[in-house]
Structure formats: C-alpha cells, structure tokens
Image (cartoon, rainbow, N blue to C red):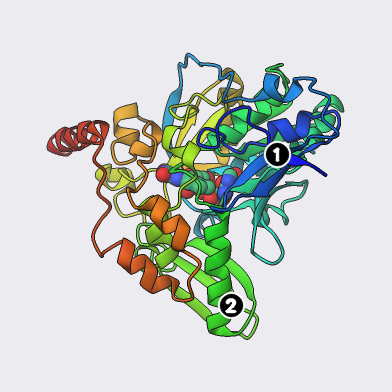
Amino acid sequence: MIEEYLNLVSKEDCCGCNACVNICPRNCISFKLDEHGSYYPYKNKENCIDCGACEIVCPVLHNNSFKLNNKIYACKNKNDEIRKISSSGGIFSAIAKCVIEHKGYVVGAAFSNDYYNVHHVIIDNEEDLALLRGAKYIHSNIENTFKEIKKLLLSNIIVLFSGTPCQIAGLKSFLHHQEYINLICVDVVCHGVPCTGVYQWYIKTLEKKYNSKVIFVTFRDKKNGWRNSSVVFKFENGEDLSMPSADNSYMKGYINNLYIRSSCTKCKFKDFQSGSDFTLSDFWGSSELRKYKKDNIGVSVVSVNTEKGAKIFNIIKDQLNDVSLIDKGVAYVFNENVSISAKINSRSQEFLANYRTEDFDRLINQYVPNQPIEIKSSQSFIYTIKRFIYLLFH
Ligand SMILES: Cc1cc2nc3c(=O)[nH]c(=O)nc-3n(C[C@H](O)[C@H](O)[C@H](O)COP(=O)(O)OP(=O)(O)OC[C@H]3O[C@@H](n4cnc5c(N)ncnc54)[C@H](O)[C@@H]3O)c2cc1C
C-alpha cells in the first residue's frame, strides 16, 4: 500500500478534525501519528479516485465566519457532586442530561481502555456520561463518529456533539453546513491540544516507574479545590500519583506550549467561530463577583451562541444555580484563550526531537524552569491592561 500525507493543507495548519476521513467514499484516508507525535491524515494512493470530497469538507480551507449576538452567563450546576467531577461548573452534564432525557445521544471525548489515547465516543445513558466528563488534555480522535452522527440525525434522533472548536467546525463542514434541528453543538474554550505522542510517552514512563499499568487519569481533580486542581494517575497495583497540576511535568510542558499541536497556534475557530450553539469555559474571574466569591467547586461561563442554544438554555436553567447574565469583558478577562491562540514555545521543535527519554520530569525542568508562563504577544498585553482596568473598578 502506498500512503502519503493527504496535503490538503500543510501539517502546520491541519487541525486533525477527521472530516476528510469521514467523507471519503473509498475509505482511503486514515489518521497516523507522525514523528513528532501528532495525528495527521494519510491517503492510500492506490484507492484514491481524486473525487475532491476531502477538499470540499476541510474546515481549514473553507472556514465560515459567524456573526454573533451571543449572550454570556456565569452559572453552575445545582448538583455539587456533578460539579466536583466536572472540570468547571458541570454545565456540559446539565445539557447532556437534558438530551438523554429526550432519548438523544451524546458524543464527546473519552479515554481509551488503556488510557493511551482519547477518542470520541457516542453514549445514550447517564451512567456513561462519566466517560465524557472532565477535560482531557490530549487530542481526541474523532474516528468515524461524524458518519455515525449523520445516521442518527437522519433518523430524527437528537444528537449533542461536544468537542474543541475545530471539531465542531469539522462536523458542520462534514454535514455541508446543512441545518439539522436535532443537532446541538457544544465547544469548549480551548488552550490547544497537546501532541498525543508526548502524552503516550509520559504514560509509558509512569508505568515503568510504578511498574504497573495506568487504570485511571484525571487532569482536573478538585480535592484541593477548582482553583488549585490536581492531576491524578492511578495504577493497577493500588498506588497513585496525585499532585497539583501546576507541579506536574506533563501539565507544565502543556501550559508552556512545548508540545501543542501546530494548528492550535493559529486557530481559525476561536472567538465563537466554530458554529457551536454553546461555548463552555471556566469562569476564572468569578472570585471578583460577590455571588461566586467563595465558590471553589467550579463556576462556568456559558456563551449561548444561537437561538437553538437559547431555547435549550431555558430548558436546563432549572438544573443550574446562580445564573447571571454577564458582560463579555467580565466573562473572559482572565481567559484570553477564548480569542487568542497559544504562542508556540521557542524550544518546542528541540523538545519534540528529544522527549523520548526515561527521566521526563528532569527533561521538562530543563525546558521549563519554575516560573509562570510568559506570553509575549501584543494581544496579551492588551489583556493585561483589561485586567488592570477590571480590577480597578470591581
Ligand atoms: C484541551 C482543552 C483545553 C481547554 N482549555 C481551556 C481554557 O484555556 N480556558 C477555559 O476556560 N476552559 C478550557 N477548557 C474547557 C474547560 O476545562 C471545561 O472542559 C469546560 O468549561 C466544560 O466544563 P464542564 O464542567 O461544563 O464539563 P466537563 O464535564 O468538564 O466537560 C467535558 C467536556 O469537554 C469535552 N472534552 C474533554 N476533553 C476533550 C478533548 N480532549 N477534546 C475535545 N473535547 C474534550 C467533553 O467531550 C465534554 O464535552 C479546555 C478543555 C479542553 C478539553
């Protein structure tokens, strides 16, 4: 079999949404890990009939722009137990519960059984929602879920699709931007996704160190609170590794953009440009508002982007507490990832050529000295000014 990079767009621009894989009438496109550990589409040259379907659906080549009249709310799930196991205020669970109660299906990111991958799965019951809850800081592979979603939509079943902004754009593009009243899309404000290869290497080093298989991972454990979340890795032999996210090597490298997917550094789908009905994020400025001041279980910002979203938000309101309509400036003043792409670390290329070493912690400490992330874009300067003005008046 002769395989080559699909090359609709350069590897630097490919967001890895899988729309090309799902649309191909000959099933001749598949995703493979490249030498730097990111998934890219490769085509089987012998089977390809050059029909051009993959080019038509690539959201990077043909991205739409959305004019929005979005309403932005701060809120949290009434159920504290759900909030504790969610990354922020548990709003995804509230929307998903509503969809399941209406006999719908929910699609989102789940770990593979061995915890070496994250992929999108389709569930139809509240018990399985646990698989989708919580942010996984690894690129989630869409696999064939777009095709499955289309079948469900054509059978008049309600589908809730959740993912990063590029994945929403990919699905919309795969559906040729046809409006389905039974499709609800939720995206997250996204820092960017790390390269899978680095995550897999990190898990491998942990398994060697603990001499046991990983059987559980969470990146946002809240036992020390939502603002000081921890990472937790559990092992088959009963041991576990639990530490503040800020001290964990994998998280340090991620937050410092050492191994972020290239396309995330010039994301076209940020700033509510994915076509989603809702955009969810942490409300990092919540402690400035009296109502949420003491809350350390998690408060969300929900941007309701469409009329469909507004109707659904009205339905789920009885599952939420402390719902406040807030200004965009207040909502995102401490969350510039809503509109600004991550800036690649200047030593990223060097790191990606060297990360396969036994002592991952030591390597990260060489690349990321113990200092807060430094972002040097001029837009970040604007955010600093915005924060200053905000704090002055609140
Ligand atoms: C890679 C990533 C980066 C993020 N960066 C930021 C940020 O910079 N600022 C911010 O405010 N919020 C960020 N978030 C979003 C935030 O952490 C919460 O996930 C979001 O606010 C929803 O929280 P929740 O409590 O409502 O539900 P949760 O139960 O926490 O929601 C989980 C949702 O996230 C989806 N999801 C989880 N992991 C992935 C993944 N790897 N790929 C695609 N979808 C995934 C699930 O499908 C589900 O819909 C990020 C999330 C991810 C996955």
Q: Where is residue 142 in the image (x, y as percent from the top left)?
A: 69, 42
Mark number, residue 207: 2
Q: Position of residue 37 (x, y in %)?
A: 56, 53
Provide the secondary structure element on which disc 1 rests: strand
Q: Where is residue 68 in the image (x, y as percent from the top left)?
A: 47, 16
Provide the secondary structure element on which disc 2 rests: helix
The residue type indicated by label 2 comes to: Glu
Residue 93 in view: no
Using the numbered discs, state the Cα–Cα distance from disc 1 to disc 2 in whole angstroms.
33 Å
- Left or right for 392, reference 135: left
Label 1 or label 2, whichever comes before in sequence order: 1
Indicate whether 32 appears above or below 315. below
Please tell me in which quadrant of the rendered image residue 370 appears: bottom left
Can you name the residue that lies furthest to the front here?
A: 2
Q: Mark 1 points at which residue?
A: 4
Residue shown at the point (26%, 64%) measured from the top left: 369
